[in-house]
Image (cartoon, coloured by chain):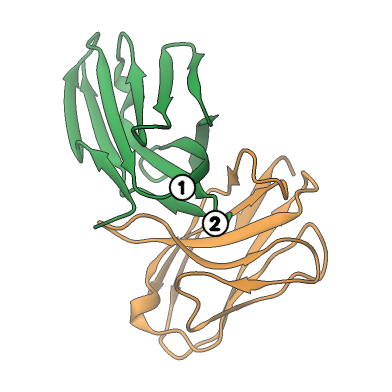
Amino acid sequence: IAGITQAPTSQILAAGRRMTLRCTQDMRHNAMYWYRQDLGLGLRLIHYSNTAGTTGKGEVPDGYSVSRANTDDFPLTLASAVPSQTSVYFCASSTTQGTEAFFGQGTRLTVV
Amino acid sequence: KNEVEQSPQNLTAQEGEFITINCSYSVGISALHWLQQHPGGGIVSLFMLSSGKKKHGRLIATINIQEKHSSLHITASHPRDSAVYICAVRSINTDKLIFGTGTRLQVFP
């Protein structure tokens, strides 16, 4: 692994199903983030974690949950997917001091 | 009004042209980022700056803190520069990134 990796790269999901998007980084960054990107809007923060064991809500947290059991992994879970959660999801990481941000390749999720 | 505004939203250029993309923001910041997103691809950080000017190859980024404005310049543009360029600022209050909606650049041969 080099940098930050997301999985899957794309997914079609039936409404009501549970889904976990995975994010792993090997840079030992303390801070990790989940964003969604929708047409005509800037990236919006869903949840974040400043360090392992802590998480916080971003701008659009409803319908999503996260966990940060260790430094490397920051999974995002949709407990019961809805069509409005169709989006491209990006995971990112940075040092606690908020220096350069590194982004994953994105997960394109379609909820039908 | 968005806290981070980019202009233009779309930009078309001929290969070799000098490109300027602008970013204005309305919040106090600790840093400003310029990011590049290729179609279907991930997001790559181009620059992070808090003052002055940075240069990397054909790319130049400038920031004027007093005017709350930044520009990204591409000299001698090339079709491979075609991408969406995103400006993001790190809020000094929340320490979180606030993103512009991006500028879609197409460079034709």
State the residue position of label 2: B93
Quarter of the image with the N terminus of chain B in it: bottom left
Residue shown at 69% from the left, 72% from the top: A55
Q: Is residue B75 left or right of residue A60?
A: left
**Chain for colour green:** B
Where residue B29 appears, as percent x and y from the top left, is: 49, 44
Q: Are marks 2 and 1 in contact (CB under 8 Å)?
A: yes
Quadrant in which residue B63 is drawn:
top left
State the residue position of label 1: B28
**Chain for colour orange:** A
Q: Could you tell me if residue A33 is visible in this image?
A: yes
Where residue A26 appears, as percent x and y from the top left, is: 78, 47
Front residue of B50/A27: it is B50
Report the chain holding disc 2.
B
User: Height in image: A50 above or below A66?
Assistant: above
Front residue of A37/A80: it is A37
